[in-house]
């Protein structure tokens, strides 16, 4: 029997965090939810998830910074950043950092497909293809 994959979900919007966490649990993933950058960073310093899913805007902090921190501590960790704001600079920074950059709103099917692919092949240089499919 295979162990459930653990996904850290980080979003400062409580409703979005609850939605994402419940959706991933229903899809068979073990989830750890954080609504603050500092809490997620502290958790990442001691625990390696199978994937980090984070919003780009986390109050005064940036989810991409969190992804870079996570990959520094856990090389090869797949990271997906979600945003509702089209920003070519952030898109390029995410790709350079090896993270997938997906636009909100995103359908359940597209997000689950991106997570599945990231868990199988990692996130380096995969962002551009999945980003284009993220909007429905």
Image: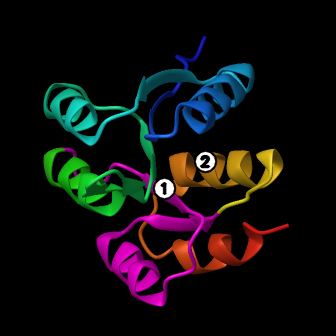
Q: Which residues are magenta?
A: 74-103
**Residue sticking out furthest to the top:** 1
Q: Nearer the viewer, residue 75 or 84?
A: 84
In the figure, 89 relative to 61: above or below? below
Report the label total: 2
Q: Residue at x 54, y 73 (%)?
A: 127
Q: Is residue 85 magenta?
A: yes
Considering every residue shown, the one lying at the far right of the view is: 136
Quarter of the image that includes the N terminus: top right
Q: What residue would you read off at disc 1?
A: 80
Write the residue at 46% across / 76% down. Answer: 125
Q: State the image coordinates of residue 135 (x, y, percent, origin top left).
A: 77, 69
**Residue under the point 22% across and 52% down:** 75
Q: Is label 1 in a helix, a strand or a loop?
A: strand
- x and y, in percent, of residue 21 in the image: 59, 27
Disc 2: CA contacts within 10 A as few (<14), some (14-19) or many (>=20): many
Residue pointed to by mark 2: 115
Query: Is 4 rendered above or below residue 130?
Result: above
Q: Is residue 15 above or below residue 37?
A: above
């Amino acid at each position: 029997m295979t162990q459930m994959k653990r996904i850290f979900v980080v979003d400062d919007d409580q409703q979005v965090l609850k939605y994402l966490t419940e959706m991933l649990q229903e899809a068979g993933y073990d989830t750890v939810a954080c609504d603050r950058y500092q809490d997620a960073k502290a958790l990442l310093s001691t625990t390696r998830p199978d994937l980090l899913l984070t919003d780009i805007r986390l109050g005064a902090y940036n989810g991409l910074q969190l992804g870079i921190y996570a990959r520094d501590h856990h090389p090869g960790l797949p990271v997906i950043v979600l945003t509702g704001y089209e920003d070519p600079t952030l898109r390029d920074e995410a790709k350079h950092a090896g993270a997938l950059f997906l636009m909100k709103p995103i359908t359940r099917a597209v997000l689950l497909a991106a997570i599945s692919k990231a868990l199988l092949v990692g996130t380096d240089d995969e962002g551009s293809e999945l980003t284009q499919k993220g909007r429905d």
